[in-house]
Image (cartoon, coloured by chain):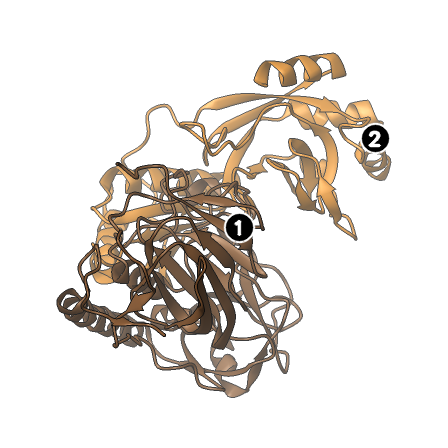
Amino acid sequence: MSARGAAHVEVLAAGPLTTVQDRGRTGWRHVGVACAGALDLDAATLANRLVGNAPGDAVLEFTLSGPRLRFARPTRVALCGALVDAVFIAIGGRPSTIGHGRPVDLPPGELRIGRLRLGVRGWLAIAGGIDVPTCLGSRSTDLRGGFGGLDGRRLQAGDRLPLGPARVGGIRRPRAPAWWVEFDDPLPTEPCIRYVPDARPGAGALSGTRWQLDPRSNRQGLRLKGDALDSPGVETISAAVAPGTLQLPPDGKPIVLMADAQVTGGYPRLGHVAAVDMPRLAQLAPGQWLQWRAIDATQSQRLWALRRAQWHRLARLLDERLPPVPARATGIDLP
Amino acid sequence: MSPVPHVRVEALADDAWLLTLGDAIEPALLARVHARVDDLRATAPPGILDLVPAYASIGVFFDPLRVGAGEVRAWLQARLDSDALQRREGGGACIDVPVAYGGEFGPDLEDAARELGLDAETLALRHAAAEYTVAMIGFAPGFPYLAGLDPALALPRLATPRTRVPAGSVAIGGAQTGIYPRESPGGWRLLGRTPLALFEPGRASPALLQPGDRVRFRPIDADAFARLGEARA
């Protein structure tokens, strides 16, 4: 029997902010369409790879704590991003703990993803990918535009998410390999984020003091709390901005633009976050302290290239380790 | 031939450059920005993802897995140094945008007119008399910032922004005019509303207006608004 188009996952509880995300949109910024997409593309890609999906397949991104989901069929899932406790309850079975950073084969049942630790965002890949329709070339949810993902909005209890075709069957008990992957070091209590200052007076001032993440932060932008920087006070002529752009509003408290940010902005710019550190920013908890370190554009490019090289090594390693789909008895049974 | 004005090129992100062509909001500079975007679009190497024009600048976004930052920089410099400018045939399209001014469609029209020392009808007619250029699209998908507002019609933004501005609202904010594509918060002064859909993600061309397009507002009455709205639905 073909499973195409028929498999679903049911959302029993959504958590504070759970959305469908892939690698985001390109090609539409000139008409005001933001990128959206997973705030840590490497984590989302890793989760996809662990379940046998393509890198661009859609996953669930959850914030602070995860959703409760019900699977009607056997499936394979992987959790990546910040550490998280998850419990799986098979129909008529006992609860078992689901590990992080590894492929987990599940029989039909309920997956309860709890609170995230040492970070605030996690990604769940499900074999076959979340098969919502593409919109402007992507399945990512554009919350401000109200399109993409599932009806352009965050998930809520009662939603049914279609899954793409995947060959997963014959799973009677939750099963996972004994290894797991940690692509990133855990986020330190007070991380240092690298940025490339603009060639403007005062752009380097960011690195002088400690900052705290303002709770009024979201997927559009992270606000920083701390001693106000000298602001030119006036708005400049609006120009293109990007995820990672550091803006300085008149109150002197910088804002870092994130994936859902609007495409143009009129605040003076301080510079941009090194691409390699964007995923770390996405893990900052409200109130958490952070520092900034200025580097130059060449260093930033090199860090990114290094990370790509690490990724390729990891991907090769995974190709040797990953259990084939459908899963065989290569893994260990979970308690 | 006039000398090529200096263009500043700086990193906007690890995967984007920002070209700054000037530091003013004025028609000649805006025309140069849009001509430059046409040229870049026509000559872009593979891996260029987005070209984002604004009043005086262009954001150039690329995929660093397909093309290096240095390679993109070299292409930009070569185009800026070249005398040849590839231009789009006939410039931007001219789009007619029907607008019902005042009343429930434009709750700020009366107050705005009073502030400007005009009556409401004169303000509406003068707003509709100009030909505008879509300088850039930002704030929200499909939100056009229109250049060409009669300077005598410039109005400060509301001290407290509205939490809900209806979709299609035509508004003045400072020296600019624009159209809200979707219900959203907003602080501009609402003069009227168009029944046209400015942005529909499911359409082949999702945005009604493109940067560089010209726009004319055509006053319509409430009946025409209802008729056009129904035709759309």
Specify the colour of chain B. Answer: orange
Taking the spot 72% from the left edge, 22% from the top edge, the residue there is B100
User: Total marks drawn?
Assistant: 2
Q: As drawn, is A121 to the left or to the right of A43?
A: right
Q: Which residue is mark 2?
A: B118
Establish if A189 lies above or below B78. Answer: below
| Display colour for chain A | brown
Q: Which mark is residue B24?
A: 1
Relative to residue B37, is residue A239 drawn left or right?
A: right
Q: Answer yes or no: is residue B3 visible.
A: no
Residue B23 point in image, percent of width and height: 50, 54
Place of residue A23 in the rendered image (x, y in percent of width and height, measured from the top left): 35, 53
Q: Chain of mark 1?
A: B
Label 1: which secondary element? loop
Rendered-image quadrant of the N terminus of chain A = top left
Q: Which residue sits furthest front?
A: A92
Label 2 resides on the chain identified as B
Q: Is residue A226 above or below residue A317?
A: below
